[in-house]
Amino acid sequence: MKPFSRQDRVSNYALFINSDRKNISIPIEVINDVSSRPLGATEIRNKGIIYNFRNEGIIQFFMNNTKNPIDIVFASKTMDITHVERSIFVDGMGKGMLVTSKKKARYVFELPGGFTAKNNINIGDRITIIA
């Protein structure tokens, strides 16, 4: 089996998040493969990544050496936002931060840092994936 690369997970999906009756969109990469999760969003600037965990539960992410600040959004199986972590930045290898969903989630979105604050994205807002 060949090693997983960033090119293997690029998708043409766009993420629409409804907040304050506004539709906010951002291009995203969809990750359904567990082996690709360590690649993360350390290089994203104008797009996001969605992780599909297939089953709903409490999800933990260990953040290490993020090159840019990122926002992490946890969503339920019905795509309702259950938790938001804003502008996470971990500088350097060997340092890390554990980020845990406060409620059960199935999907995790990594977005450019400040995206959720700028667009007023909060717990209870809905997400729709459009191909």
Image (cartoon, grey):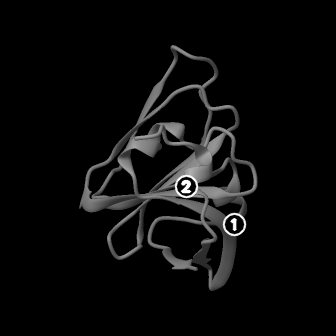
Q: Mark 2 and mark 1: span between their CA atoms?
A: 26 Å
Under mark 1, the amino acid is Asn
Residue at figure coordinates x 46%, y 44% from the top left: 36
Picture coordinates of residue 37 (x, y %)?
Answer: 45, 43
User: Given the current orientation, which residue lies at the most extreme top position?
Assistant: 94
Q: Earlier in the sequence, mark 2 or mark 1?
A: 2
Residue 56, position as x, y percentages in the image: 25, 61
Q: In the rendered structure, which amino acid carries the disc numbered 2?
A: Arg
Residue 56, above or below 94: below
Foreground: 44 or 18?
44
Q: Which of these two is toward me, 7 or 113? A: 7
Q: Which residue is mark 2?
A: 9
Residue situated in front as seen by the camera: 40 or 33: 33
| Horizontal side of residue 93 vs 36, given as left or right | right
Left or right: where does residue 5 sit relative to residue 34?
Answer: right
Say few, some or many: other residues with alpha carbon within 10 Å of mark 1 (under 14 / 14 to 19 / 20 or more): some
**Residue occupied by mark 1:** 119
In percent of width and height, residue 19 lies at 60, 76
Looking at the image, which residue is at 32% across and 48% down?
Answer: 59
Q: Which is more foreground, mark 2 or mark 1?
A: 2
**Quick one: which residue is furthest to the right in this view?**
46
SS assignment at label 1? loop
